[in-house]
Image: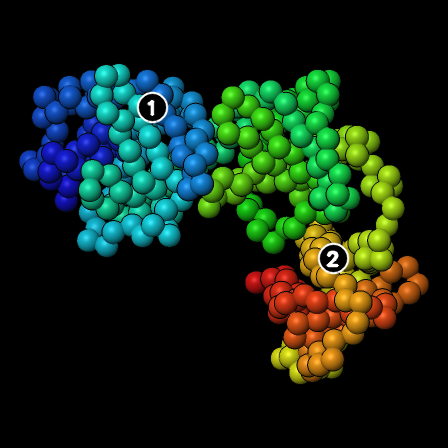
């Protein structure tokens, strides 16, 4: 049972004025009610800070309006919230007073030197997470820098193009499915949206799904499919001369052949199934492109780990993977841990 004045401050933050247990008698005194109402009325703005220093302004009216639904099923815990488990920090700025600060994790929050756990703490995290996602894309867009990572191209959008991005971002809908397995499709479009605050990075994962990293959090949004079409007009993939790896982005199937020393299983990836399989295939090619070509073959490459086979049109491109190297099209490349990373990538589809 919550019984101290200090913990009543948490109740002020995350519960109604009548949360059972705020006062020792089980009721909140009239003086305490007045005090809490006064404190809430002094809030000027509410922000959330990410673990990497980004700060997003929340809708204070909506925050205070929905605050009354919070605070149920909270217990003081002797187990502190570990720094590695912190997702973000909630800050309430008050008139002529020090701000109120709550450190938020997925299953616990810290406030006033105490750690709170329970179902209410998890629900509180989800609630603040939802509000933060809305706040991230609500910032006023000043300019937009578009990049296509797989093409090695980037430019600042003109004002009419930026205005289109404002409209798309303004109508973006939060995606409840985290899609953690979704890697960006070729050509890996990304936008840096500049506002009065810290720039917001936006990854275009699929024609209808974008991701916005926020410290240890990542927010996903559903957007109009026309966005991807516009991006291909503004930065066409066809404008770039292909290197020897680029044709692999067009693979319709990838096969892992377990014919080496590494403990892997024969695996096939049908790239035509969904955007998830397609994203994994494109990410696999990106890993290969990170290798550095060697002018002279290695004297001791070690044991072959396994092979990757990319099916492109009517041809099969074979890649041999070794502990620190790989061989493709008669050329050797150095790339530490490529065999492990490629296998982990394909295994992610099974999780």
Label number found at residue 321: none
SS label for mark 2:
helix
**Frontmost residue, 72 versus 301:** 301
Q: Is tag 2's residue or tag 1's residue first in the polypeptide sequence?
A: 1
Res 152 quadrant in image: top right
Q: At 10% from the left edge and 21% from the top edge, which residue is drawn? A: 30
Q: What's the CA distance linking mark 2 and mark 1?
A: 49 Å
Q: Residues within 10 Å of mark 2 (few under 14, many from 20)?
A: some
**Frontmost residue, 314 versus 304:** 304
On the rendered structure, is 266 left or right of 263?
A: right
Query: Which residue sits furthest left?
Result: 25
On the rendered structure, is 206 left or right of 4?
A: right
- Give x and y (percent) for residue 17: 21, 27
Where does the N terminus fall, quadrant-wise? top left
Q: Which residue matches tag 1?
A: 64
Asked if residue 124 is positioned above or below residue 155 in the image, the reply reads below
Res 88 quadrant in image: top left
Q: Is residue 255 visible?
A: no
Where does the C terminus fall, quadrant-wise? bottom right
- Give x and y (percent) for residue 293: 77, 63
Q: At 73% from the left edge and 35% from the top edge, which residue is drawn? A: 154
On the rendered structure, is 7 left or right of 309?
A: left
Asked if residue 126 is positioned above or below residue 299 in the image, the reply reads above
Q: At 51% from the left edge and 21% from the top edge, which residue is drawn? A: 196
- Give x and y (percent) for residue 264: 65, 77
Image colouring: rainbow
Q: Which residue matches tag 2?
A: 289
On the rendered structure, is 344 left or right of 226?
A: left
Asked if residue 349 is positioned above or below residue 43 in the image, the reply reads below
Q: At 11% from the left edge and 34% from the top edge, which residue is drawn? A: 5
Q: Residues within 10 Å of mark 1 (few under 14, many from 20)?
A: some
SS label for mark 1:
helix
């Amino acid at each position: 049972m919550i019984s101290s004045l200090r913990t009543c401050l948490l109740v002020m933050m995350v519960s109604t004025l009548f949360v059972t247990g705020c006062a020792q008698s089980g009721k909140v005194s009239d003086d305490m009610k007045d005090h809490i109402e006064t404190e809430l009325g002094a809030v000027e703005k509410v922000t959330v800070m990410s673990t990497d220093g980004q700060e997003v302004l929340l809708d204070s009216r909506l925050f205070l309006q929905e605050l009354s639904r919070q605070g149920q099923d909270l217990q003081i815990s002797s187990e502190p919230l570990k720094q590695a488990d912190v997702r973000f920090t909630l800050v309430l700025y008050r008139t002529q007073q020090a701000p109120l600060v709550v450190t938020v994790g997925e299953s616990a929050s810290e406030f006033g030197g105490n750690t709170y756990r329970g179902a209410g703490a998890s629900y509180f995290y989800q609630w603040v997470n939802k509000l933060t996602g809305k706040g991230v894309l609500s910032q006023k867009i000043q300019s937009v820098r578009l990049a296509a990572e797989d093409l090695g191209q980037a430019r600042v959008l003109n004002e009419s193009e930026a205005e289109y991005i404002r409209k798309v971002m303004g109508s973006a809908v939060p995606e409840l499915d985290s899609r953690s397995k979704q890697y960006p499709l070729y050509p890996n479009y990304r936008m840096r949206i500049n506002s009065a605050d810290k720039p917001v990075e936006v990854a275009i994962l699929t024609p209808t799904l974008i991701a916005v990293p926020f410290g240890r959090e990542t927010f996903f949004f559903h957007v109009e499919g026309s966005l991807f079409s516009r991006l291909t007009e503004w930065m066409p993939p066809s404008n770039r001369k292909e290197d020897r790896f680029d044709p692999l982005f067009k693979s319709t199937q990838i096969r892992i052949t377990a014919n080496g020393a590494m403990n892997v299983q024969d695996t096939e990836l049908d790239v035509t199934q969904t955007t998830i399989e397609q994203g994994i295939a494109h990410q696999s090619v990106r890993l290969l492109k990170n290798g550095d070509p060697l002018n002279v073959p290695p004297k001791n490459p070690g044991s072959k780990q396994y092979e990757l086979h990319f099916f492109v049109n009517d041809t099969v491109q074979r890649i041999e993977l070794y502990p620190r190297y790989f061989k493709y099209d008669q050329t050797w490349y150095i790339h530490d841990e490529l065999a492990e990373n490629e296998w982990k990538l394909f295994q992610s589809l099974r999780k």
